[in-house]
């Protein structure tokens, strides 16, 4: 295994599968299988999950909801996804803990770094819900921050596209995928990997990112084994 401790970022939107909103149970099951496969290799796994399938603060703002209020609604949306994921992981026999960036004592532990690390060492999958607990941030920033805090080797950003391209592959079929690219080049070429807050945090702390297609079975396993053809490594 190339990595020992990973932070996997899953977007809320991806959980929708083919549905218009909410959680697609088939997609959830597929993700659980992918995660279980790498867990069986002995990896320590932390997960940050988004909330875009349920609510985004910015969208709420355009509907007249106060931005800060909307962001908290977004954070709660991530907790709903995190609870669904936790339940699905446990159903498959894995041990998990859900830690939240805001206090929801009946369902989550508060985020405490040392405790999170201890859970990982004991083989539990740790899910970070409610983002970092502050408005004006995203779950990508949460992924970067928590990964740094717990000393993860890499952030794995699972999306619908299989990596970072020279141009938007949905607009230009000629676009080429990078197998690896430096942080500097991403800035210079104006490519989009994560929001800038999240991206800069990784850069400043020398934390590599891999963008990959989480919907293709086996991809996650290939990446943790070190297959550089899968996804794009930003280093
Ligand atoms: N959010 C926030 N602070 C955080 C993380 C999330 O305010 O630390 C809110 C924000 O409104 C965001 C929403 O939660 O739009 C859902 O997260 P995100 O959009 O990152 O989810 P994804 O796009 O990954 O599904």
Image (spheres, rainbow, N blue to C red):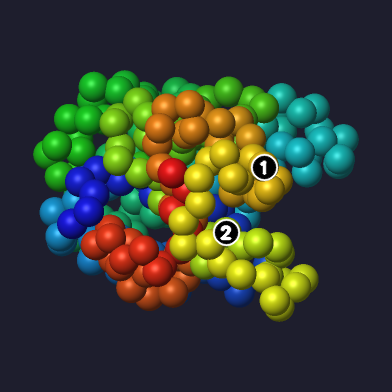
Mark 2 close to ligand 1, CB under 8 Å: no
Instruction: Please name the residue shown 23% across and 22% down the image.
Output: 114
Q: In x, y percent, where is residue 51?
A: 58, 47
Judging by the rendered image, the residue that carries numbered circle 1 is 188
For the C terminus, the quadrant is: top left
Residue lying farthest to the bottom in this orientation: 173
Q: Horizontally, is 77 left or right of 61 in the view?
A: left
Instruction: Please name the residue shown 22% across and 30% down the image.
Output: 117
**Pointer 2 or 1: first along the chain:** 2
Q: Nearer the viewer, mark 2 or mark 1?
A: 1
Q: Horizontally, is 13 left or right of 214 in the view?
A: right
Instruction: Please name the residue shown 75% across and 73% down the image.
Output: 172
Q: CA distance from mark 2 to mark 1?
A: 14 Å
Q: In x, y percent, where is residue 28?
A: 43, 65
The dot on residue 207 is: none
* In the foreground, 219 or 182: 182
User: In the rendered structure, are the residues bearing label 2 and label 1 in contact, judged by CB atoms less than 8 Å apart?
Assistant: no
Instruction: Please name the residue shown 40% across and 32% down the image.
Output: 206
User: Residue 176: which quarter of the image?
Assistant: bottom right
Q: In x, y percent, where is residue 200?
A: 56, 31
* In the foreground, 201 or 83: 201
Q: Is residue 160 visible?
A: no
Badge 2 marks a residue whose secondary structure is loop
For the N terminus, the quadrant is: bottom left
Mark 1 close to ligand 1, CB under 8 Å: no
Judging by the rendered image, the residue that carries numbered circle 2 is 164
């Amino acid at each position: 295994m190339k990595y020992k401790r990973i932070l996997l970022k899953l977007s809320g939107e991806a959980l929708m599968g083919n549905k218009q909103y909410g959680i697609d149970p088939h997609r959830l099951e597929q993700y659980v299988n992918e995660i279980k496969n790498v867990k069986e290799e002995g990896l320590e796994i932390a997960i940050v999950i988004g909330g875009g399938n349920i609510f985004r603060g910015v969208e709420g703002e355009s509907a007249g909801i106060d931005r800060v209020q909307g962001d908290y609604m977004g954070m709660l949306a991530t907790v709903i996804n995190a609870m669904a994921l936790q339940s699905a992981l446990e159903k498959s026999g894995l041990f998990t803990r859900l830690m939240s960036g805001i206090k929801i004592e009946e369902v989550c532990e508060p985020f405490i770094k040392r405790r999170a690390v201890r859970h990982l060492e004991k083989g539990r999958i740790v899910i970070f819900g409610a983002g970092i607990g502050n408005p004006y941030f995203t779950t990508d920033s949460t992924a970067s921050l928590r990964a740094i805090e717990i000393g993860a080797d890499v952030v794995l950003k699972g999306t619908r596209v299989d990596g970072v391209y020279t141009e938007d592959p949905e607009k230009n079929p000629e676009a080429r995928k990078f197998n690896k690219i430096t942080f500097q080049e991403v800035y210079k070429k104006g490519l989009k990997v994560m929001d800038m807050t999240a991206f800069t945090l990784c850069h400043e702390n020398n934390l590599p990112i891999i963008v990959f297609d989480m919907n293709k079975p086996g991809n996650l396993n290939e990446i943790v084994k070190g297959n550089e053809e899968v996804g794009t490594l930003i280093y």
